[in-house]
Amino acid sequence: MDLQGKTILTGVKPTGTLHIGNYVGAIRPAIELGHHVSQTGRHIMFVADYHAINAIKDAVLLKRLRKEIACVYLACGLDPNQSIFYMQSDVPELFEMTTILMAYTPKGFMNKAHAYKAAVDKNHIKGEPADSGINMGLYTYPVLMASDILSYDTDLVPVGKDQIQHVEIAADIAGSINALYQKEVLKIPSYFVQEASQTLPGIDGQKMSKSYNNVIPLFGTDAEIKKAVMSIKTDCQDINAPKNPEEILLYHIIRGIAPDTVVQEVKEGLEKGGMGYGTIKKMLLASILQEVSEKREKYNNYMAHFDDVQDMLNEGAKKARAIARPVLERTKDAVFAR
């Protein structure tokens, strides 16, 4: 896909302590994309803290999570001089735009939104009323998401397959507004699925997830990372038996994080036989520590000097507002015939 001169937008919710699966599947691809796009276009990256309050009502916890997620991305290589990096809640134009978009969004869109339908399905399973525990923030989540996208004249949004609907709803809302006023009031966004990003399995073979308690912590201590790696599920095949790497959990994990030379060595060792799982676990541990040790040091430094991080986020918010304000004013000009 040609990203030359495009505006690319990515958001991340501060929902909990991150793990290696988050790094491989989301953090690293977003940062690499930012470095690439910023050469000719514009990369916008934000912490979606207003989206987070739909689920997290503990203010102290949310404060910590907001802080952690910002420091994680910076430690992993996000460059605030290349990417516009900010807290969603620091751009008030978004919420004025959200109010406008509400007036042009069919309620049926919200009824079909994946997050709302999933919450209703959970209630049905528990035998509770359909809308039990569902707040309006969750119900109208796609409209705020549309505002996040449309407020910056975004060209493309990188998504996972389960997030495509959000961009489609944003495009539909923008299209209906443009059709009503017979001009391009809002840019119609598109999406692309980052096929290169990987879903890393957890230590038990399921998708790596905090809810499954099967993660390898991203910035845990060496001992915590070692404990997780050594707990990875293995089978009882003879060490000398040739094996299909695609059937070995350890191979799928090491393939996501280790250098190509290490991955190839493990692949050949499994195919020929003679390479034990203990050896592979040691190679995986060494690869993870090689990848994260320096980043962990930077993360701890950012956490200890968060005033510097806050300055970066404040500067990012200024840049974001400078883009969003003209788009908002253009929309108000159309809506109110100003």
Image (tube, rainbow, N blue to C red):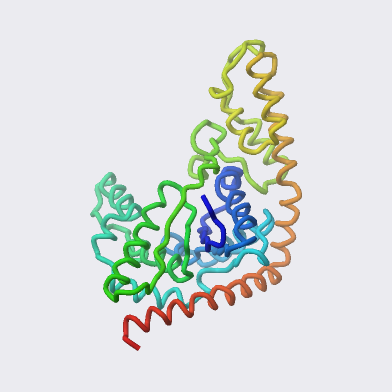
Q: Measured from the top left, where is residue 99 in percent x and y?
A: 35, 75
Q: Is residue 274 above or below residue 126?
A: above
Q: Residue at x 68, y 27 (%)?
A: 264
Residue 300, located in which quarter of the rendered image?
Answer: bottom right
Q: Measured from the top left, where is residue 200 in percent x and y?
A: 55, 38
Q: Residue at x 36, y 57 (%)?
A: 168
Q: Measured from the top left, where is residue 333 in percent x and y?
A: 37, 84
Q: Measured from the top left, where is residue 323 in percent x and y?
A: 52, 75
Relative to the observer, which residue lies in front, 88 or 80?
80
Q: Residue at x 41, y 68 (%)?
A: 187
Q: Is residue 155 above or below residue 237?
A: below
Q: Is residue 117 left or right of residue 7?
A: left
Q: Residue at x 51, y 56 (%)?
A: 15
Residue 225, located in which quarter of the rendered image?
Answer: top right
Q: Dividing the image into 4 quarters, which one contains the C terminus?
A: bottom left
Query: What number of labels is visible?
Result: 0
Relative to the observer, which residue lies in front, 175 or 70?
175
Relative to the observer, which residue lies in front, 131 or 89?
89
Relative to the observer, which residue lies in front, 213 or 104?
104
